[in-house]
Structures are given as structure tokens and as C-alpha cells.
Amino acid sequence: MKLFQRYVFRQALWPFLTAILALSALAILTQSLSNLDLITDEGGTALLFAWITLLAMPQVIALIVPIALFIGCAVALNRLTTDSEFIVGAAAGLSRFGRLTPFIRLAIYVALANLVINLFVQPASFREMRQALYEIRTDLAASFMREGEFVPLGGEVTFFAREIGENRVMHDIFIEDGRGRGGVAYSASEGVITQTAEGPVMLLNDGVLTQIDENGELSTLSFERYEFDLTAFIDPGAAFFFKESDKYLSELLDPTATDLARASSRDSLLAEGHYRLSSPLYNIAFALIAAAAYFSVEFRRTGYGRFIAAASAAALMLRLLGFAVQAAAAGDSGLNALQYAVPVLGSIGAVLVISRPMRRFRAAGAHA
């Protein structure tokens, strides 16, 4: 890479890094807002909330990287063009392709990094996130940990603990179980939640069971130890399994019978797999589209505002078309080839505009 090309590469790299940091900060904010229920509803800690938000970021970063690259290339191209640095490079004998090469090189590097995120980082982080979410949603102890409050469990059971001591040992417990005909009330000096082979239970120590017997009379039964079954209070939708976004490429393109049973269809797995492979191509397409806004016309003293606006609209339409093709491929695996065709055709179109500018752009440049 020539000295001027290395200079251009750095001019594009720093705006790209700035854009991806800014977009990532915005994505973290929106992602954290969607995860607030982990604290408000599920009883998670702030540290766990931050960890879940961080684990969700690789997929978000993979989506915003092409946008950040477009912004970085557009900013660099605008500065290099308005400061006449490209004219100096051309006067020194650097061809149009030579001036374009640093942006293509940056786009290829970013596409490779995007591919690594798609194939390895995202599934690894999403598996960890899925495990953490499962533990939160099945942690009954966390939902019970409210001193001095009556906690409803479902529609017919109410739980109360006066105090929670060390190791999550609860003291002065009262449980009203309205299920069944007469209902049952439990009171115990202490209790703790634990796992058994049959599922989670609350071990109640030194307590009394009160209920209405078959004769309609109130009866009490003292016990030293009683196991109150909690399996009925586990969310049946919280079963642990990996979704399409959590799977590695081999699991998506060559699914087992178990993978197929968990997935909505084989086509959805294939669509996700081909999306992981094809989406990095949008980095090259976006960089070329940004370049086309400046290389498609001669130098303009009035600026390139409308050209970059047209390039932005073209990039947006291209990405929306890619999402539409991905959704269609989830129902028909024969459309997966289009997931590669969309960014490739977008790149080819941008190259044609760069190499052979449209007449109206030439005319606009002449009048300027």
C-alpha cells in the first residue's frame, strides 16, 4: 500500500471506529431498556443485568457495523474531496481505483471481523445469555426473596416470610394454598428452597399444617419437616434449549433430529445459517455505495449533499431488501441464494456507477 493510500485508509478508519462506538452506545441503551424486566420482574441484580446486556451486543454490533462503515467512508471521502486531497493524489498519478483501494481494503477487513462475530462470537455469547436467562427465570428463591411481603404465586397460593437470613434461610413462614376443595395453610419457623430429583421444593421445618377435613372440621397437623412442592410455579415456557440465533454454523446447515424438533422448520435453520455467511458482504456493498456518491461526479464546489443522501437511501433499501429475502428464505430454502445475490448486486451496481457515472451527474458537475 502506497503512502497516500495508507493515509486515506487511516482517514476512513478513525471515523468508522468513532461511528461504531457511538452506535454501540445507543444500542446498549436500547438493549438495556428491553432488559429492565430482569430486575423489576425477575429479581435479578444490576451486575447480572449488565452481563445479559453485554452478551446481547455481538448480534447488535454485527447489524450496525455496515452502517458505521458507510458513515466512516462518507466522512473520510467528504473531507478528502473538499480538501482537494484526492486531486493531489490524482495529480501524482494515482488512478481512480488506486484512490478507491483503501476503502475496499477497510471494507474487507471489517467484513472478515463481521464474519467471525457471526460464526463464533454471537453463538457463544447467546448460549451464555440463554443459560443465564434460564437460571434467572427458574430461580424461585429469587422471586420469594421479599421480607415482610405477601407474594402471590399463581392465582391461588400466597407466600410470606418475615425475615430472610444467611444462605437464603427464611424465618417465620406462612403459605396459603387455595388449590383443591378446602385449601391448606402452612406455617413454619424456617424454610429453604432446594432442588430434588423431582424438581424444586421448599423444605419447611418445625411447623403446622391447617386444613378443612372431609367432615368440614378444622384440623391441624404438626410436623418437624415438610416438603412443599414448587414445580407447579415454574414457567413452562422457560424450558432450556438453544434457538436459531444461539447455534453454530454446523448446527444450522446440518441440523440433528433434536435441532429440527426444536426449530420452527429446517428452512428457518438454513436461512439463519446463510444469513450468517452472507451478511458480512453488506460491508463491502455499503463502502462502495458511499464511494459512489463521490466518485460518480467530478469535483463539486457546491458539495455532495444530495449525492450522499441518494447513496444513503440506496444503502437502506438494499439492507431492507436483504431482510425481506432472509424472511422469505425462512419459508423456502430455495431463496437462500438471493441472500448472497442482494449484497453482491448492490456492490456491482456501485462499481458501475463509480466506473461509468450517470450522465445527469456529469451534467450536474458541468453546471457546477
Image (spheres, grey):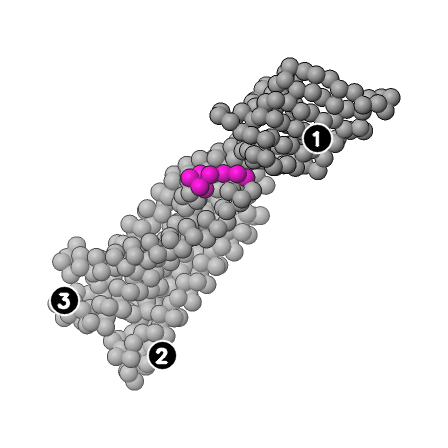
Q: Up-down: is 307 above or below 125?
A: below
Stretch in magenta: 42-49
Q: Alpha carbon of mark 3 to alpha carbon of mark 1: how far?
A: 86 Å
Residue under label 1: 176
Which numbered tag is attached to residue 360? Answer: 2
Image quadrant holding the C terminus, namely bottom left
Q: How crowded is mark 3: few (under 14 residues within 10 Å), some or many (20 or more)?
A: few
Say which residue appears at 26% left-offset and 75% top-offset: 298
- Amino acid carrying mark 1 in the image: Glu
Quadrant hosting residue 83: bottom left
Position of 86 with respect to 194 (left or right) is: left
Furthest residue to the bottom?
A: 367
Position of 64 with respect to 259 (left or right) is: left
Q: Alpha carbon of mark 2 to alpha carbon of mark 1: how far?
A: 79 Å
Q: Position of residue 17 (x, y in %)?
A: 29, 54
Mark 2 or mark 1, earlier in chain: 1
Say which residue appears at 69% left-offset and 20% top-offset: 208
Q: Where is residue 48 in the image (x, y as percent from the top left)?
A: 44, 38
Q: Residues within 10 Å of mark 2 (few under 14, many from 20)?
A: few
Q: Are marks 2 and 3 in contact (CB under 8 Å)?
A: no
Residue under label 3: 93
Determine the secondary structure under disc 1: strand
**Given this view, does label 3 or label 1 mark the residue nearer the observer?**
1
Quadrant hosting residue 283: bottom left
Q: Position of residue 34 (x, y in %)?
A: 50, 49
Along the viewing direction, whichever of 59 and 187 lies nearer the viewer: 187
Mark 3 or mark 1, earlier in chain: 3
Mark 2 or mark 3, earlier in chain: 3
Q: Alpha carbon of mark 2 to alpha carbon of mark 3: how far?
A: 27 Å
